[in-house]
Amino acid sequence: MKALKYIIPLAIFGILVVFLGIGLTKDPRKVPSPFIGKAAPAFTLSMLHEPGASFAPEQMRGKVWLLNVWASWCVSCKVEHPILNEMNRQGVVTIVGLNYKDARADAQKWLKQNGDPYLFSVSDIDGKVGIDYGVYGAPETFVIDKQGVIRYKQIGPITPEALDKTILPLLKQLNG
């Protein structure tokens, strides 16, 4: 009976160690999104450079496009930004920026310093649209098809590998 007193806590500890070990082998960028295959959430936000103008995703119907969540305070956004600039230069896809929880002046200054790969950016100052899209943090990128359906979500910066192996083939398929 006394042995059970020690075996049960030891067994529970062993089970927790197994679950922790399994969790540590998972890639946090491959978190499945419940939005894949569903319509992109609707919103209307003011444009970063033209606060009097607004944008809603319905305006992109008929086009394959990327919604890239970024911020001037985001270190990883600066890492992925050269890839976005190159995609824009090559005309790979239309990119719309969702400036996330950022001051308008800081965002505008950041784009001026680092280049602006976006057709335009909209301001999600309070982060409500980010919440609707299930954003964990910046950067995140969504591939949205011609019908307004989310087809892919990149958590974290777009890497050359993710671009070549996943995003570009998907864009080609969707534009097919």
Image: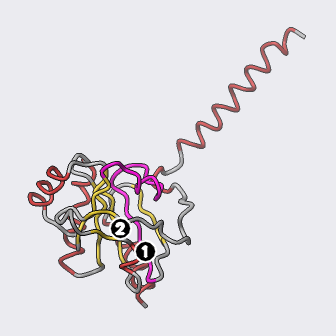
Residue that numbered label 1 is attached to? 144
Count of all numbered marks drawn on residues in the image = 2
Instruction: Looking at this view, name the residue that lies furthest to the right.
Output: 1
Q: Residue at position x 43%, y 74% from top?
A: 144
Quarter of the image where one finds residue 165: bottom left
Q: Position of residue 137 (x, y in %)?
A: 38, 49
- The residue lying toward the viewer, choosing from 14 and 75, is 75
- The residue lying toward the viewer, choosing from 32 and 126, is 126
Query: Does 142 lie within the magenta span?
Result: yes
Quadrant assignment for the C terminus:
bottom left
In the shown orientation, is residue 139 left or right of residue 10? left
Q: Secondary structure at mark 2?
A: strand
Q: Is residue 38 above or below residue 126?
A: below
Query: Does 145 lie within the magenta span?
Result: yes
Q: Is residue 60 above or below residue 5?
A: below
Tell me the magenta residue range. Answer: 125-146
Q: Is residue 25 above or below residue 81?
A: above
Q: Residue at position x 56%, y 72% from top?
A: 37
Q: Secondary structure at mark 1?
A: strand
Q: Residue at position x 48%, y 66% from top?
A: 41
Amino acid at dot 1? Ile
Q: Position of residue 2 (x, y in %)?
A: 86, 8
